[in-house]
Image: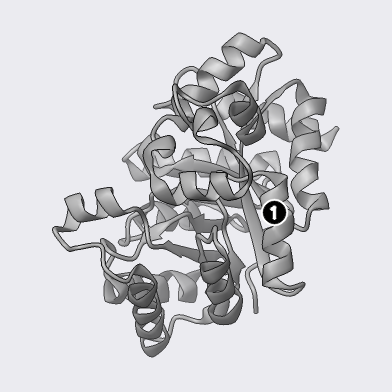
Amino acid sequence: MVVEVGRIGLWAAQRQWPTDVRGRTDIAVEVASMGFPTMWIGAASGDLELPAAILDGTEGLVVGTSILNIWTEKADIVADHYAMLAKAHPDRLLLGFGVGHREPVERATGRPWEKPVEVLLDYLDTLDELGVPREDQALAALGPRVLGIAAERTAGALPYLVTAEHTREARRLLGPGPLLATEQKVVFSTDAEQARAIARRALAPYLGLPNYTNNLRRLGFTDVDLTDGGSDQLVDALVAWGDETAILARIGAHHGAGANHVAVQVLTDTPGELPRDGWARLAAAIGG
């Protein structure tokens, strides 16, 4: 059975969450009370401690990892923790995996960045051998090759830092069946200068990573768009900002382009904290 993630979920990095179990549980209960079906954990760790706290503390909230890096998170450790959580909370955990990025991977592991797609396939083979169901896996996929692997080997794809145009092409490449859960950054501000400043701060780390910049070039952006923090055109394409109507329209554009699910990352001027007020505002807009 494929994990049911719903239409709209929340995305937040693991580093934004409190470290104590009680604090994590309280926030998870708050998210569930807002009506969101899925919580995505960015840069998750393979011990799955944060997903465990969220799952243990709520009744129906689904947790997705977005992503577990295949170079740094050992497959056997992930599989062991998955097995325990899947037994206690069936159909509520979706493991998102990805190949990461060359420079951070080489710095973190000391391993050369060689044949990442082959490393990914080997990792997926190991998960198969360890009994992790394919329907509980998904891939952080941007380009055609990994999108194809996601469709063939897992429940589907988790594109990050993309536009609705990418979503449309991803759906074409995946076909009608696989899950397509697209991440979308949003800023609740109608002040263009303020919204773009918040957006540029969030985009800065990604504009130096070839996986993302190459994909943005495929979408038609130029080197000019990718320099100096990103052009207004690029920022506005990647980060939805404005009032509730404008933001819901951008989320809806992904659905209209073929996404089953949109993982919304609310950006604020305090990036180290969970945007709980923004989550509540989004929940009210969806409910309205």
Closer-to-camera residue (95/276): 95
Q: Position of residue 55 (x, y in %)?
A: 50, 57
* Residue sitting at x 70%, y 32%: 282
* Residue sitting at x 52%, y 20%: 198
Q: Quadrant of the C terminus?
A: top right
Return the residue found at the far right.
Answer: 288
Residue beneath disc 1: 167
* Residue sitting at x 35%, y 83%: 126
Q: Residues within 10 Å of mark 1 (few under 14, many from 20)?
A: many
Q: Position of residue 80 (x, y in %)?
A: 32, 75
Closer-to-camera residue (285/67): 67
User: In the image, what residue type sits under mark 1?
Assistant: Thr
Q: Is residue 94 above or below residue 182?
A: below
In the figure, is residue 200 to the left or right of 110? right
Q: Position of residue 137 (x, y in %)?
A: 51, 71
Return the residue found at the far front.
Answer: 223
Q: Is residue 189 above or below residue 256?
A: above
Quadrant for residue 208, please give it. Answer: top left
Q: Position of residue 112 (x, y in %)?
A: 19, 63
Q: Total marks drawn?
A: 1
Quadrant for residue 119, please give it. Answer: bottom left
Q: Is residue 268 visible?
A: no
